[in-house]
Image: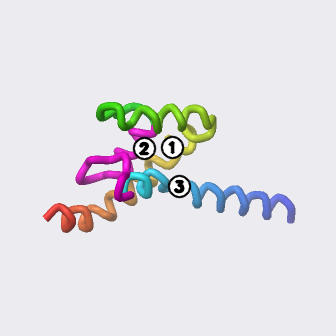
Amino acid sequence: MKGILRTVGVIGLVLQLAGCGTFIGRLNDGLSDAQYYRGVDGNLHLLGVRGGGSDGMPAAIVCYMMIVCPLITVVSLPVDAALDTVLLPVDYINTL
């Protein structure tokens, strides 16, 4: 029974953390300036891959100081890509 509760707890934590790049990229003052795939762009900003000037680097430094953040960002990247694909019609309508 303990093993089942532990497994459910870990799966629940992973599901809560997955897709955080989508939320970061879609904030009003978000890291992303992209029109499409903002979540993936937000993840790339957090990893420091996409600088975009000096805006992305402070977030990348803070992310790397928290040792777990880069790992969670890389793991959630496919989830963010899937969510951004589902949200493509919304992004298209917002660009009109």
Mark 1 secondary-structure assignment: helix
Q: What's drawn in magenta, residue-wise?
A: 27-46
Is the residue marked by circle 1 packed among few (<14), some (14-19), or many (20+) residues within 10 Å? Answer: many
Q: Residue at x 41, y 55 (%)?
A: 22
Q: Which numbered tag is attached to residue 18?
A: 3
The residue singled out by tag 1 in the image is: 73
Where's residue 76, x and y in %?
A: 50, 49
User: Which quadrant of the rendered structure holds the N terminus?
Assistant: bottom right
N-term-proximal mark, 2 vs 1:
2
Query: Given contact means CB atoms under 8 Å apart, are the residues at marks 3 and 2 in contact?
Result: no
Looking at the image, which is closer to me, 77 or 35?
Answer: 35
Q: Which numbered tag is attached to residue 37?
A: none
What amino acid is found at the position of numbered circle 3 in the picture?
Answer: Ala
Q: Residue at x 70, y 56 (%)?
A: 10
What amino acid is found at the position of numbered circle 2 in the picture?
Answer: Asn
N-term-proximal mark, 3 vs 2:
3
Mark 3 secondary-structure assignment: loop
Relative vertical location of residue 12 with respect to residue 47 in this rendering, above or below? below
What is the CA distance from the residue labelled 3 to the residue labelled 1?
Answer: 8 Å
Does the segment drawn in magenta span residue 28? yes
Q: Which numbered tag is attached to residue 43?
A: 2
Q: Residue at x 51, y 31 (%)?
A: 61
Relative vertical location of residue 66 with respect to residue 14 in this rendering, above or below? above
Where's residue 25, x and y in %?
A: 38, 52
What is the CA distance from the residue labelled 2 to the residue labelled 1?
Answer: 6 Å
What amino acid is found at the position of numbered circle 1 in the picture?
Answer: Thr
N-term-proximal mark, 3 vs 1:
3
* 31 to the left or right of 1: left
Where's residue 42, x and y in %?
A: 39, 46
Where's residue 50, x and y in %?
A: 34, 34
